Image: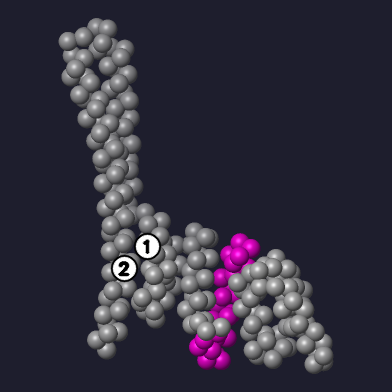
């Protein structure tokens, strides 16, 4: 369909009149007039597409945001768009895509995108933090075993307390102090096992995320 210049100008003017923070309005308008907006000049269309993609994220439509991010990244590459609004637009779109995948619980995919982003901008602190969170959400099998052991020790502590109250205290009072020590050992052991496992998982993930970024930065410095 051939849209007249006056109509295209009206479409863009009305779109911009919505305001950058009217995310629901931006989504509705873009989807209603998408065919007309595509006919705009490249810079105007790219501006609308960027705001629409951002609005999808802000309204929580993460699945659609990921799809539009891929389309946006393709356009950025094909048209060699390096900066927009004074910032690295490729890095910005990559980060938002990874954040959307994180919200969709696609942690492995988000991790892959973030690693690619960090290869480009190894000093990007938000990217490193999000990569850390993605790694933390991917629970290794050893952590599941540690948690199971912590739960088992806690349950043994509960059993020991029950025996201490209903059996040892009334019938074997001479063993009460020993029973008290046993249930404390089980309880403290469960708490320590859980805490040590979680701390080890956090430390390993932090080493992987920040260590990866540091390695990339060193390679860039040496090259």
- In the image, residue 10 above or below residue 109: below
**Residue 132 disc label:** 1
The answer to whether any part of residue 19 appears in the image is yes
Callout 1–callout 2 Cβ contact below 8 Å? yes
Residue at image point 28% right, 59% down = 204
Horizontal and vertical percent position of residue 132: 37, 62
- How many other residues sit within 10 Å of disc 2, few (<14), some (14-19) or many (≥20)? many
Residues rendered magenta in the picture = 56-84
Residue in the foreground of this view, choosing between 160 and 212: 212
Q: Quadrant of residue 115?
A: bottom left
Q: Is residue 193 magenta?
A: no
Name the foreground residue: 64 vs 92. Answer: 92
- Residue 172 shown left or right of residue 166 in the figure: left
Q: Is residue 75 left or right of residue 147?
A: right
Quadrant (top left/top right/bottom left/bottom right) for the C terminus: bottom left
Task: Reply yes or no: does residue 74 show up in magenta.
Answer: yes
């Amino acid at each position: 369909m051939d849209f007249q210049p006056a109509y295209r100008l009206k479409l863009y003017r009305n779109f911009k009149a919505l305001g950058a923070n009217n995310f629901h309005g931006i989504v509705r308008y873009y989807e209603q007039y998408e065919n007309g907006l595509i006919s705009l000049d490249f810079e105007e269309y790219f501006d609308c597409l960027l705001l629409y993609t951002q609005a999808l994220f802000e309204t929580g439509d993460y699945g659609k945001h990921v799809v539009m991010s891929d389309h946006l990244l393709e356009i950025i590459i094909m048209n060699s768009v390096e900066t927009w609004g004074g910032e690295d637009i490729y890095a910005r779109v990559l980060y938002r895509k990874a954040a959307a995948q994180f919200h969709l619980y696609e942690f492995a995919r988000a991790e892959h995108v973030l690693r690619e982003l960090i290869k480009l901008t190894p000093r990007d602190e938000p990217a490193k933090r999000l990569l850390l969170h993605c790694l933390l959400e991917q629970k290794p099998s050893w952590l599941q075993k540690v948690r199971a052991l912590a739960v088992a020790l806690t349950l043994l502590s509960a059993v020991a307390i029950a025996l201490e109250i209903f059996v040892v205290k009334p019938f074997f009072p001479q063993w009460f102090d020993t029973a008290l020590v046993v249930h404390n050992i089980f309880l403290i052991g469960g708490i320590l096992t859980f805490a040590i496992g979680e701390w080890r998982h956090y430390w390993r993930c932090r080493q992987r995320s920040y260590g990866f970024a540091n390695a990339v930065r060193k390679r860039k410095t040496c090259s």
